[in-house]
Amino acid sequence: MLSQERHERLLSYLNEHKAIKVSDASKSLGVTEKTIRLDLETLENKKLLKRVHGGAVLAETETSLFPVEGRQLNHADKKIQIAQKALNYIEENEVILLDGGSTARALASLLGEFPLTVLTNDIQVANELYKKEKVQLVMLGGTRLGDSSVIYSQQTLDMLDNMFVRKVFLGTTGVSLEQGLTVLKSYHVEWKRQAIKSAKEAILLADSTKFGQVGLMCFARLEELDTVISDDELAEEYKVFIQNNHMKCL
């Protein structure tokens, strides 16, 4: 088993159970306890967990990337601010793609005042939109993954590959000048890369707490984007980087 897959499975278990033992992980993943300890050390260095005697627990910090449900409820004021900025960046009759995540859902909740076509593969985003008469909703097909709200399969990628959208509004787990835009699940990498490829303009929706954070896998460099929409607390170094790379910062 590749280290990337082990890391995903370790984090998935932690997100559900809050703690994990080295001995149990070793048996479950079929590798030595030394390998698991090295995996936990790597994940701790990325601030994804905290090692304790005999295992690890979730990192309990303000900017922790886990648990996912709790993280999505945090910084609601920042997400609303970002959604309002993004709304002003959308024009009537455009075709846009909304990625999953709490900030995308905040944006979806504001749509509906003018005609628009919206593609998405997120059930919760679609739920915000399906009753809005002026929004033509296109739900990309596929299979629901676990207990998440994401629909994903090769069918999802194939559908997106045959479509062209004016703007894609992307979410991310972390943003780093060195590591780029990162996520915790491998299927997010394929999806987001295809989303960027399918759009004329790639726009990141990310609150300021995600900058400086690093997930497991990179799906794009920051400079591959056209526009970054964040809240008013975005660090100056990122504003300078965006400006120097001829991108828009809202």
Image (cartoon, rainbow, N blue to C red):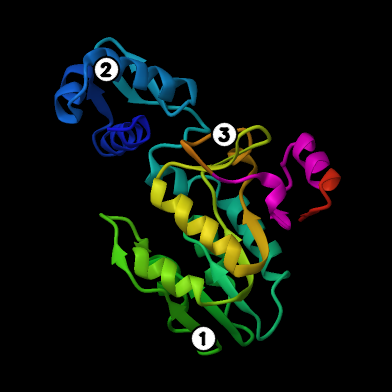
Q: Position of residue 3 (x, y in %)?
A: 35, 29
Q: Identify the mark nearer the N-term, 3 or 2.
A: 2
Taking depth in this image into account, of 3 and 206 the one nearest to the observer is 3
Up-down: is 42 above or below 85? above
Residue neighbourhood size for the residue with mark 1, other residues' Cα within 10 Å, grouped as few (<14), some (14–19), many (≥20): some
Label 1's element? strand
Instruction: Please say whether residue 238 is one of the residues in the magenta stretch.
Output: yes
- Measure how far apart labels 1 and 2 are at the Cα level: 49 Å
Measuring 71% from the left and 62% from the top, which residue is drawn there?
Answer: 85
> Does 231 sit above or below residue 36?
below
User: Would you call the spot at circle 2 few (<14 residues within 10 Å), some (14-19), or many (20 or more)?
Assistant: some
Residue 135 shown left or right of residue 223 in the figure: left
Q: Amino acid at mark 3?
A: Gln
In this orientation, does residue 35 appear?
yes
Location of mark 1 (residue): 136
Q: List x then y, in percent, for residue 247.
A: 79, 53
Residue 213's disc is 3
Q: Quadrant of the C terminus?
A: bottom right
Q: Is residue 153 magenta?
A: no
Earlier in the chain: of badge 1 and badge 2, it is 2
Label 2 residue SS: strand
Residue 177 location in percent, x, y?
68, 35
Q: Quadrant of residue 176?
A: top right
Tell me if 180 is positioned left or right of 43 in this view.
right
Is any atom of residue 121 visible in this view? Answer: no
Task: Specify the segment rendered in magenta.
Answer: 219-242
Residue at the spot x=36%, y=65% of the render? 154
Give neighbour class at mark 3: few <14, some 14-19, many 20+ (Cα, 10 Å): many
> Which residue has dot 2 on it?
55
